[in-house]
Amino acid sequence: MIFIGGISMGKKELDFFQTMVCKKCGQYTNLTVFMTYTYFSFFFIPLFKWGKKYYAVSRCCGTVFSLDPEIGKAIERGENVTLSEEDLNPTGYEENGTAHCPDCGYLLDNDFAYCPKCGRKLF
């Protein structure tokens, strides 16, 4: 008997929409929230998920902000949540995959352990 199963990463956009001033660039923007997770599938059917993380993406500059898991779970459940600047923690990444230093905004290569401009330890 052959079993087909595996572990994969998933991404799901959550049903959330909010307009606010971007914490990074200061422009008026829309935030979109998504969840990333790891899941186990058996015969191509996802059975369970773990390692959920929640992020918000600013549409003006593409900055990705991490969210507290409790806030993310509330959004996932469909509760009425209003995000504030304090809830948004810059990850240093943009939606297109480029990385910037969360402190000074310097464009980084993937192999940097420290920011060459400000010296912050990265990731």
Image (cartoon, rainbow, N blue to C red):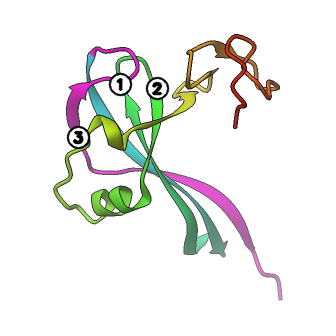
Q: Residue 63's mark? A: 2
Residue at x 23% of width, y 40% of height: 17
Is residue 18 located in the magenta-colored stretch of the structure? yes
| First-in-chain label (3 vs 2) | 3
Is residue 33 located in the magenta-colored stretch of the structure? no
- What residue is disc 1 on? 23
Identity of the residue furthest to the left in this view: 80
- 82, 31: nearer the viewer: 82
Residue at x 20% of width, y 61% of height: 79
* Position of 43 relative to 62 (above/below): below
Q: Amino acid at mark 3?
A: Phe
Gap in Å between the C-alphas at discs 3 and 2? 16 Å
Give the position of the C terminus as an image quadrant.
top right
Are discs 3 and 1 less than 8 Å apart at CB? no
Q: At which x and y percent is residue 105?
A: 56, 15
- What residue is disc 3 on? 17
Q: At which x and y percent is residue 13?
A: 39, 47
